[in-house]
Image (tube, helix red, strand yellow):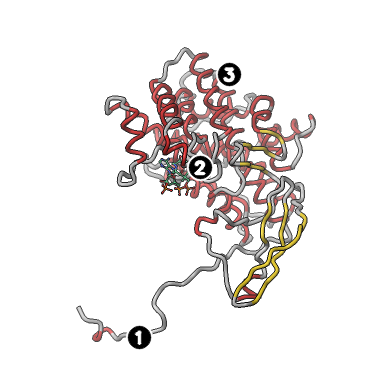
Amino acid sequence: MASATPTASAEGTVALEYDGKSLSLPLIQGSEGEVGIDVAQLRNKTGMITFDPGFGNTGSCRSAITFIDGERGILRYRGYPIEDLAAKSTFLEVAWLLIHGELPAGPELERFRRETTYHSMVHEDFGRFFEGFPKDAHPMPVCAAAVGALATFYQQPETEQSIHDSVVRLIAKMPTIAAYSYKHSLGQPFMYPKNALDYCSNFLHMMFATPCEEFVADPILAKAVDLLLILHADHEQNCSTSTVRVVGSSRANLFASIAAGISALWGPLHGGANQQVIEMLDSIEAEGGDVRAFVDRAKDKKDNNRLMGFGHRVYKNYDPRAAILKNACADVLKAKGLASRQLEIAMKLEAIALSDDYFISHKLYPNVDFYSGIIYKALGIPVNMFTVMFTLGRLPGWIAQWIEMRGDPDTRIARPRQIYTGATARAYAPLEARGQ
Ligand SMILES: CC(C)(COP(=O)(O)OP(=O)(O)OC[C@H]1O[C@@H](n2cnc3c(N)ncnc32)[C@H](O)[C@@H]1OP(=O)(O)O)[C@@H](O)C(=O)NCCC(=O)NCCS
């Protein structure tokens, strides 16, 4: 499974002055002009390391998959603007694009559609695996456990063919696993996938159908799910993607690496934020709908409340995905004849925050999670499944990044250093000498 090889050319050096000495560090330049200082020889040559908690200034790899310009609000997959992909493509096409580097030709897309359709069932024994979880289990750890467990069903040695099979199985089975985790929480029977349906209609079928009556997925809602998945499909070296790469750098298999990514995505500061946005909007409404008061609390450093769905490590401008979703939100609600008090509150919050000095000076804008939860609610997706939807979308991005990492000759097992701040060497204290 080949993907475009990341390239970057060296463009000059910078000099590091220390202790009266000088070290010349090479510069690396990317295809969009970003420049990195290559510090690979730093510790060898100087005994010093870099210190960058949260890795905000650290490039961990070269990558040819996704380009983000956070200052200008630009997001592109393999060079294609997210706006074009959202308007013209389907999730399966985007998944192929991310993994293979090019949009699929007709026969390639048809083969991919067939493969991901005909691998969507899970082994019956695997279905029973869900029974062990408590009924109130959050579906994210259930999904992480289930994806990790796929590695026990597919234990072939790693070859190009077995990686291809794992990719197909993951993309095909993820909607089934996601829907099973939901059905388990309801105590309803699992619904088998239906091969006649497209990817997102099939997911809605497995989520909402029961064996007792006919269910027809609404094409407007299936299209909205497809859009949401496209918008979430990759976002360069974010927390969960870096996790997938770090785990995969130890040569852990694709299933194990993706399971780790799902766990990283579960955190409230990452994929869990859309659930928190809905909870925030609900609590604002429950407290009388005073949007201004909530914005003031979010600015107060003594108050732990942040404006959820606002701010981003990379975007210091309007997140382009949020702009697309804001319009989609209004369209879906209109097409379904639904009113959303949450959308009203969200738009008020956005208007106040975007004209407030604090949010302007901190460059805090709505991110993708600000509107995604509102659409999910309109689609009938329960709140605790929101992050699972994010997982469905992010899967091809994680896969593409894992494959790129494995093929990159610069990949080494991820192993950061630290600045040790603990006790220096001291004599062991016997128990009787340790006091109370
Ligand atoms: C996304 C997020 C984790 C990015 O974090 P980060 O890059 O580490 O930025 P920081 O947390 O250091 O924030 C920088 C400053 O903005 C403030 N800030 C960031 N997000 C804020 C928010 N949502 N509401 C209020 N203040 C916020 C911080 O308090 C900090 O202020 P200070 O410099 O005056 O101390 C952060 O913006 C956040 O928590 N947002 C809400 C959660 C969310 O929507 N996550 C989804 C991300 S897709």
**Is 31 located above or below residue 223 in the figure?**
below
Q: CA distance from mark 1 to mark 2?
A: 46 Å
Q: State the residue at coordinates (66%, 42%).
A: 67
The residue pinned by badge 1 equals 428
Res. 413 in view: yes
Provide the residue designation for mark 3.
Answer: 219
151 up-or-down from 19: above or below? above
The amino acid type found where label 3 is placed reads: Pro
Label number found at residue 312: 2
Asked if one can make out residue 181 in the rendered structure from this viewpoint, the answer is: no
> The residue tagged with tag 2: helix, strand or loop?
loop
Residue 125 location, x and y as percent? 52, 44
Foreground residue, 366 or 273? 366
Residue 339, quarter of picture:
top left
Frontmost residue, 273 versus 380: 273
| Label 2 CA crowd tier, 10 Å (few <14, some 14–19, many 20+) | some
Distance from mark 2 CB to nearest ligand 1 atom below 8 Å = yes
Left or right placement of residue 102 versus residue 48 in this view: right
| On screen, residue 116 above or below 62 | above
Give coordinates of residue 374: x percent, y percent: 45, 27
Q: Secondary structure at mark 1?
A: loop
